[in-house]
Image (cartoon, rainbow, N blue to C red):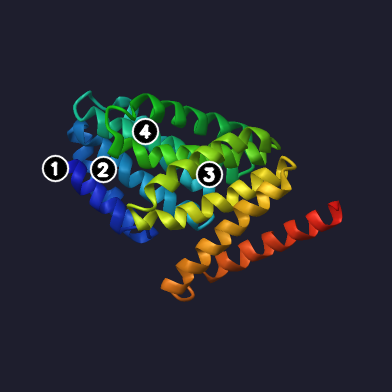
Amino acid sequence: MAYRVADLIQRSVGDLETTTRLVAIWRPPASVLPRLGADLASVLRLRASALSTAGRYDEALIDIEEALQVCRRAPLVRRIHTEVQFVAALSLRAHVLRCLGREGEAVDDARNALILCRERLSHAPHRYGPFLLTALDELARSLDKTGEPGQALPLGEELVHILRRLAPRRPRYNRYLAASLHQLGVYLSGAGELTAALRATDESLQLYRRLDDKQPESFARHVAAATHNRDLLLDRLEHQG
């Protein structure tokens, strides 16, 4: 029951004030009942995400470190939930470290999260599947930021491949497919594969346009960014001759 409550919280809140209240609520019972540690880790991670969104990365790291420590100390009961929270916290720490310019550490965290997801996916695909996507994306972005677009490329291609399978059955994944295609275009461009980069970027643009038609103005900035990147690639291809 508790893990379902934690998942509901995760889906429904994201603002800093609410997550701070949740941390205050969850800490006392978790200190008495260690099996609730994974739920405390979940709300700590939610607050860290809200802090990260606000650009308060150093504070976010404090919450993430606590979440990881809580997961390491948690008893074996509800093992899958604890491991999922640990993987999620690793991926979030990778994101925060990348935003802080600590790309090498970000690569290590994202790679470890991806390894854990791959190892556990067959045991609980619905629990680990979303975090596999996150870990693939974060590792690719971190590698690209270290100046390794060639290493980021197969991860970006794998992510797009998975999302292509998911999106027809679950339309909510279309926005993630569009974003992943956009990033794939970035990796391909960095690797010098401009024609393939243009195809990925143009597909991303078309998908963002369809999303924006369904939800006017919701994806306008994404359409603008994809249009800008497509035009840059067209210019590079033209000059390349």
**Alpha carbon separation for disc pair 4 and 1:** 19 Å
234 relative to 165 in the view: left or right: right
Along the line of sight, which residue is nearer the eye, 56 or 135? 135
163 relative to 99 in the view: left or right: left
Q: Which residue is mark 3?
A: 96
Q: Are marks 1 and 2 in contact (CB under 8 Å)?
A: no
Residue placed at 57% from the left, 62% from the top? 205
Q: Quadrant of residue 102?
A: top right
Binning the other alpha carbons within 10 Å of mark 1 as few (below 14), some (14 to 19) or many (20 upward) gives few
Binning the other alpha carbons within 10 Å of mark 4 as few (below 14), some (14 to 19) or many (20 upward) gives many
Label ID, residue 86: 4
Residue 75 x/y as whole percent: 23, 24
Q: Are marks 2 and 3 in contact (CB under 8 Å)?
A: no
Toward the left, the furthest residue is 1
In the rendered structure, which amino acid carries the disc numbered 3?
Val
The reply to whether residue 238 is visible in this rendering is yes
**Alpha carbon separation for disc pair 2 and 3:** 23 Å
SS for tag 4? Answer: helix
Q: Nearer the viewer, mark 1 or mark 2?
A: 1
SS for tag 1? Answer: loop
Pick whichever of labels 2 and 4 is earlier in the sequence. Answer: 2
In the rendered structure, which amino acid carries the disc numbered 2?
Arg
Q: Which residue is mark 1?
A: 1
Q: Nearer the viewer, mark 3 or mark 1?
A: 1
Along the line of sight, which residue is nearer the eye, 141 or 44? 141
